Image (cartoon, rainbow, N blue to C red):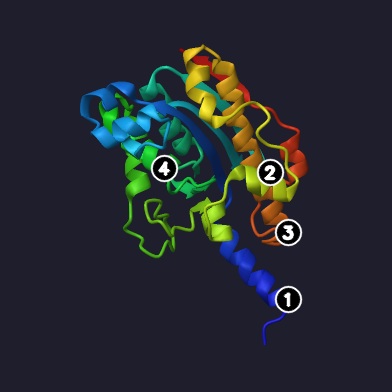
């Protein structure tokens, strides 16, 4: 018969390899040039009506991320740029930096991605837009694109399979924990976590056109902080501290570094 200590021991043995976390979010605006050049009438109508467009038409203008290693926040940055390739280089190099290597340059810890609806939006958009700028991605970034797509360890015994929807190295909170697409705003309201103080995602295009770049950066960073806070709460109470992740009180005290490059 399994007792409490047996379950806790096995859980700790299993979760010991999940020590690094990359929480991230992107903000996008329509790629109007692409829409003008190839969109069909239905897609152009969606654009005119400010409706949701297919992933390929989402031009990334902001990236916010938080890297957690061994229970501490290593980086918390929010970046806005008019150069999409610059944003994508930042993402792939951040993905690289969220790994941990030993003195022999061998990767010892792979990051767990944490997102809100990231499996259906953020990651597909990042991958799709990377195709547009692949020649502008630096060599280290290109190598870690291949790391993302590696699938030789099907059951993830020693190596992640990030491109698999059911990977254990990407926790899309609504889908993987609650089984449904649920907005960050709704989940945070239920959890008593402040969110959406800096603006509205539907207004990002207007902010960008008006040069309100810092507002976009802070809005995006707020989503990342709220996502990290939500995961901290889930880890503490749903997972019984399964992961070595900071407590919500610690996350509440940190502020992002804002980078504007336009």
Question: Counting other residues with Cα less than 10 Å from the Cα at mark 2, is it few (<14), some (14-19), or many (20 or more)?
Answer: many
Q: Name the residue under label 3.
A: 237
Mark-to-mark CA distance, 4 and 2: 21 Å
- Contact between labelled residues 2 and 3, with CB atoms less than 8 Å apart: no
First of labels 3, 4 by sequence position: 4
Q: Does residue 155 lie above or below 73 as drawn?
A: below
Extreme residue toward the bottom, this view: 1
Quarter of the image that includes the N terminus: bottom right
Judged from the image, the secondary structure of the residue bearing numbered disc 1 is: helix
Judged from the image, the secondary structure of the residue bearing numbered disc 3 is: helix
Residue at position x 43%, y 30% from top? 50
First of labels 4, 1 by sequence position: 1
Horizontal side of 197 relative to 114 (left or right) equals right
Residue at position x 51%, y 12% from top? 210
Quarter of the image that includes the C terminus: top left
Indicate which disc residue 123 carries: 4
Q: Mark 2 points at which residue?
A: 229
First of labels 1, 2 by sequence position: 1
Mark-to-mark CA distance, 3 and 4: 28 Å
Q: Where is residue 258 in the image (x, y as percent from the top left)?
A: 59, 20
- Contact between labelled residues 3 and 1, with CB atoms less than 8 Å apart: no
Indicate which disc residue 4 carries: 1
Horizontal side of 257 relative to 136 (left or right) equals right
Judged from the image, the secondary structure of the residue bearing numbered disc 2 is: helix
User: For residue 56, what is the image quadrant?
Assistant: top left
């Amino acid at each position: 018969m399994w007792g409490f200590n047996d379950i806790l021991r096995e859980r700790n043995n299993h979760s010991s390899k999940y020590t690094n976390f990359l929480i991230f979010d992107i903000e996008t605006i329509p790629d109007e040039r692409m829409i003008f050049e190839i969109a069909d009438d239905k897609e152009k109508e969606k654009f005119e009506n400010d409706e949701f467009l297919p992933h390929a038409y989402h031009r990334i203008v902001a990236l916010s991320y938080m890297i957690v290693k061994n229970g501490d926040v290593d980086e918390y940055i929010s970046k806005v740029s008019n150069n999409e390739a610059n944003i994508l280089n930042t993402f792939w190099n951040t993905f690289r930096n969220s790994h941990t290597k030993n003195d022999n340059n061998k990767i010892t810890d792979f990051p767990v991605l944490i997102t809100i609806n990231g499996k259906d939006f953020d990651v597909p958009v990042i991958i799709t837009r990377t195709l547009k700028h692949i020649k502008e991605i630096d060599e280290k970034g290109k190598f870690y694109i291949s790391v993302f797509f590696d699938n030789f360890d099907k059951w993830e015994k020693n190596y992640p399979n990030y491109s698999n929807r059911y990977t254990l190295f990407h926790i899309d909170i609504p889908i993987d924990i609650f089984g449904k697409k649920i907005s960050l705003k709704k989940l945070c309201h239920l959890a008593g976590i402040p969110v959406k103080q800096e603006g509205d995602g539907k207004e990002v295009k207007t902010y960008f056109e008006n040069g309100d770049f810092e507002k976009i950066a802070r809005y995006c960073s707020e989503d990342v902080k709220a996502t990290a806070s939500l995961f901290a709460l889930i880890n503490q109470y749903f997972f019984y501290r399964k992961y070595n992740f900071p407590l919500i009180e610690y996350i509440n005290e940190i502020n992002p570094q804002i980078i504007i490059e336009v």
